[in-house]
Amino acid sequence: MLFNIIQKSFLNQKKAVALMLVSVAAGTAVTASLLTVSYDISGKVSKELRSFGANILIEPKVEGLAGISGQKRFLREEDIVRAKAIFWRHNIIGIAPMLEATVEVKANSRTATYDIIGIWYEKSLPLPGEEKQFTAGTRTVSPWWDIKGQWPDSHEKVIAGASLSERLGIKTGDEIFMNGKRFTVSGTLETGGREDNQIIMELGALQEFMNMPGKISKVLVSALSKPMDEFAYKDPATMTQAEYEKWYCTGYITSIAKQLEEVFRGSRAKPVWNIAETEGKVLNRLTLLIYFLSFLSVLAAALGVSTTMIMSFLRRTHEIGLMKAVGADSGKIITVFISEACLTGLIGGTIGYVLSLIVSQYIGTQVFSARLEQREMLLPIALGSAVLIAVLGTILPIKKALSIKPAIILKGAE
């Protein structure tokens, strides 16, 4: 009996049913697409924000008399590959070691003391226990570096910062003397930062030049991380064992820094807070915006369904009055409307889910230049939201249907 009523209702209201299906499908498509984006947005946006620079700094740990006396401490180059052996190794997308020193530079009859840094611009390193390699170097943490000329291909070549080059009156191809040794400028660098006033060499070349084999001054790390929340700021020393394990196994910038500190011997790893906190705020606000837009899409679709069902209800008042007159109680009336809504939701939700696959991939390729991962769990969520949209749209029509007086309606139909 219920099936026949629903079937006749759908066949007699083809335009109204079509409008409801469009409303449900559109609302579901938008909601499912936004949820697909929300699941991937943390990783995608965090990866985009990584182009702004490293978010973890690893330095030598200086304590006690060494700190008071100003003794120089160094990290070990051999520990760099161990960064890809920590629990969150897949979140490490950039590693850039640096060795800092001071040299006397002579060029064009001008002599002055300048800072010099040794770096890897781009270097492939083996992954511990794996055949494949990963790329380390400044290019992985500072992709905006603009080198005019070429990176040194020998130990006798250097890069000069733009401001330093202008001050000394040197350009690509010129020769300079550092601590009495001759070098050729293979290019210039302009970053807008302190590197513009420095000389840059290949890390191994500077280690050899300064007789500091295997030593590095600091390591910049670019890591994908989870936005910081209240728990993330809790002092690990005050945590219970269960809390510490949860914190340690969560991808906070602080827990990743802790694990890096453990593999770099004699080190202190700390987040670059201005970058890390900015990322967290951006990600949290984007996620909140997505959920807000999802709510609005569900609400708008529900209003569309409700409007259409009220119009349908006005044409079905005599049918409802007759059902009441022959003994249908409120429960049966509600069952008819809810059943129609659920069927509409399932059909519209299926259509909307298929549309969301297209929409979410379009958003992924246009915004992130990458395909978004499709999760199987989104299908039941899409169908559930579609049924919710349809059911919400029936609330007002049901109230009006329950208020119908059969005697008045049927008398008016005579």
Image (tube, rainbow, N blue to C red):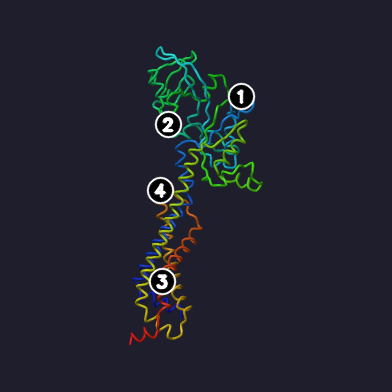
Query: Disc 4 vs disc 3: Cβ atoms closer than 8 Å?
Result: no
81 lies left or right of 122: right
- How far is mark 1 from mark 4, CA to CA? 54 Å
Q: Amino acid at mark 4?
A: Thr
The x, y position of residue 239, in whole percent, is 64, 45
The x, y position of residue 257, in whole percent, is 57, 38
Query: Disc 2 vs disc 3: Cβ atoms closer than 8 Å?
Result: no
Say which of marks 2 and 1 sits in front. Answer: 1
Residue named by callout 1: 68
Which type of secondary structure does the marked residue at label 3 adopt? helix
Residue named by callout 2: 145
- How far is mark 2 from mark 3, CA to CA? 61 Å
Disc with the residue nearer the chain's start (2 vs 3): 2
Disc with the residue nearer the chain's start (4 vs 2): 2
Residue named by callout 3: 396
Between 129 and 27, the one lying in front of the other is 27
Disc marking residue 365: 4
User: Which image quadrant: the C terminus?
Assistant: bottom left
Question: Which class describes the residues within 10 Å of circle 2: few (<14), some (14-19), or many (20+)?
Answer: some
Q: In this rendering, is residue 315 above or below 357?
A: below
Q: Amino acid at mark 2?
A: Trp
Q: In this rendering, is residue 348 above or below 127?
A: below
Disc with the residue nearer the chain's start (1 vs 4): 1
